[in-house]
Image (cartoon, rainbow, N blue to C red):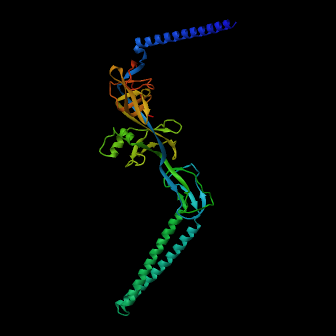
Amino acid sequence: MKHFKSMKHLVSQFSGLWLLSIVVVVIYGCGGAAGEAAAGNPAAAIPELPVMTVDTASTITTRDYAAQLEGKVNVDIRTQVDGYLDKIFVDEGGFVKAGQPLFQVNDKPYREQLNKDIANLHAMQSSLAAATLNVEKVRPLVENKVVADMQLKTALAEQQTAKANVEQAEAAVAASRINLGFTLVKAPVSGFIGRIPKRVGNLVGKGDAAPLTTLSDISEVYAYFSMSENDFMDFSAGATGSNMEQQLKHMRPVSLILSNGNVYTHKGRIEMVDGQFNKTTAAISLRATFPNPASILRSGNTGKVRTSQDYQGALLIPQAATQELQDKFFVYVVGDSNIIKRQIIQIAGSVDNHFIVREGLKRGDKIVTAGIETLAEGTPIKPASGAPAKDTTGTQK
């Protein structure tokens, strides 16, 4: 019985070794076959990727800049006198013409002051008349040597004092008339009335922090925006002229993109460029003027100014052919023996799904257009046909 168990154990060990040998043979056979396949066909490990030849094209690019809109004229309406607000002649948001009454401040104190100053003027005029009569009376007496010259000199001095008093009274009357006129506040320009925070009965004055209202002339609107230094150099490159005024006339018209994404009907023009770049932001401020005949635009609106620029002979490459790393863009250029090399490029703008290359590539260079995520510099590829760059128009990002 013991002998039988030993034989059974020996047979079990032999069977395990036999199965292990079969597994080793199978694995070795598979691996050997794969290795021989790889060794016999090295090209099977080289990736086949689309490649395109860089060419030039003509295109128009546009770029959008955030803008703040203001009316052609924005006037804070304030009173020049203190008093209670008696009347409001306009409604918020209403359109008024230049010279139209807006507010009435209680004028009774100023009217009474005017009457008082007029009465004082009359008194001074009477004093002047009396002084003049005295001079006329004393003069012949002095000439006939009835009285001393001193009396005539005294009379003349009194006459001069009376004249000065009359002039002073006349100035007071004029000032009172002006103050009385200030009680009726009129529109200095035509435009739209803003919010009116004061109500009838409120005490108003020239020292108030807030104005009575704001009047906006929006027959034209100004769109203020900023450009980077590079963008401004590109945009103004085609403008000719010996001074900035002439150059502004040759700049391309600009469009306005409203806050809802719609394009404003009328084109605008650049009419102001700041005299210097901001040292902190390295940007320069510009102003575009847009006509506003339908009064659609209002002060305080926001939008985007869209500029356009022609590129003749631009190098266009697909954005998918680039990699961005630390604010730098790279492409893989196909060299001799289809060995790839990573190349730094500078981007001038973008059109649809293409980049405009400023530096780093030239016409005739070949670049990989897809599958570049896993590529390493110095490795070979198998080129496949790629789509060439086409003429296109789009919006810069």
Q: Nearer the viewer, residue 23 or 3?
A: 3
Splitting the image into 4 quarters, where does residue 238 fall? top left
Identified at 58% across, 50% down, the residue is 92
Q: Nearer the viewer, residue 354 or 109?
A: 354
Quarter the C terminus occupies: top left
Identified at 55% across, 51% down, the residue is 194
Q: Is residue 253 above or below residue 365?
A: below
- Residue 41 position in % (x across, y down): 41, 12
Total tally of numbered discs in the picture: 0
Q: Is residue 345 visible?
A: yes
Q: Is residue 382 above or below residue 191?
A: above
Q: Is residue 395 visible?
A: no
User: Residue 202 vs residue 251: left or right?
Assistant: right
Quarter the N terminus occupies: top right
User: Residue 46 vs residue 173: left or right?
Assistant: left
Q: Nearer the viewer, residue 196 or 89?
A: 196
- Residue 58 position in % (x across, y down): 36, 28
The outermost residue toward the front is: 2
- Residue 109 position in % (x across, y down): 58, 68
Q: Is residue 43 above or below residue 314?
A: above
- Residue 386 position in % (x across, y down): 40, 20
Q: Nearer the viewer, residue 331 or 77?
A: 331
User: Residue 5 vs residue 326: left or right?
Assistant: right
Identified at 35% across, 30% down, the residue is 314
The outermost residue toward the left is: 242
The outermost residue toward the right is: 1
